[in-house]
Image (cartoon, rainbow, N blue to C red):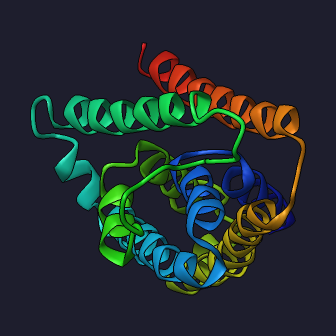
Amino acid sequence: MLEFIGATFLLIATPGPGVLSIAGVGSGFGFLAGQRFLWGLWLGNFLVGLAVIFGLKAVIFSVPYLPEALLGLSLAYLSYLAFKIAFAGTKIAFIKAERVPGFFDALALQAINPKAYAVNATFFTTFNFWPEQFTTMILIKILIVNAIWIPIHFGWLYAGASLRKLDLPPRVQRGINIFMALSMVIVVALAISSQS
């Protein structure tokens, strides 16, 4: 079970569409506005987890070209965000948007987020620490995943909102933007290479 907890922490904490977008919403719109987005991400991730548990992922991904289309949509969105971040200038701007991204925006993001499917598949198809009590093991995994997922995402939201309040020099803000943009590009590259 300790291996599962460690893997869960690492898989959730690494930058992906959810983590990077929640930091961006916090940076662009503040902590309170970001909470609606965070709960949309959570529900979306929870629904993806249920889809994996009940085998819906296999059905969804058996439709010809649907996995590639979802991956393409997600990668296009991440690339767009990386471009917006990298060229935001000297103001920290993980995400620039005309309106506050809300609950349903986050829910939709998780539906096309390949990392959500891959990570949940890892959570619920490996690390069988209690195979003779399968239902209990799945419930324990759901509790562990949420006990790690929620604080990490609140942490990223808080980090984004905190950066918004800081009066950092322009070159530092530009550096943060470039770092976040590069992180997203790396996520895109890893997703593409994992499909090869």
Residue 44 percent across, percent down from the top left:
39, 70
Q: Residue at x 53, y 80 (%)?
A: 33
Q: Residue at x 60, y 54 (%)?
A: 126
**Relative depth, front residue between 166 and 176:** 166
Q: Residue at x 51, y 16 (%)?
A: 193
The answer to whether 83 is drawn above or below residue 54 in the figure is above
Q: Residue at x 87, y 57 (%)?
A: 167
Q: Quadrant of the C terminus?
A: top left
Identify the image quadrant of residue 181. top right
The answer to whether 42 is drawn above or below residue 66 in the figure is below
Identify the image quadrant of residue 25. bottom right
Q: Quadrant of the N terminus?
A: bottom right
Residue 160 percent across, percent down from the top left:
72, 62
Residue 164 percent across, percent down from the top left:
74, 62
- In the picture, measured across the screen, residue 126 lies left or right of residue 3, that is left
- In the picture, measured across the screen, residue 12 lies left or right of residue 162, that is left
The answer to whether 181 is drawn above or below residue 55 in the figure is above
Residue 189 percent across, percent down from the top left:
54, 19
**Relative depth, front residue between 178 and 189:** 178
- In the picture, measured across the screen, residue 154 lies left or right of residue 3, that is left
**Relative depth, front residue between 18 and 124:** 18
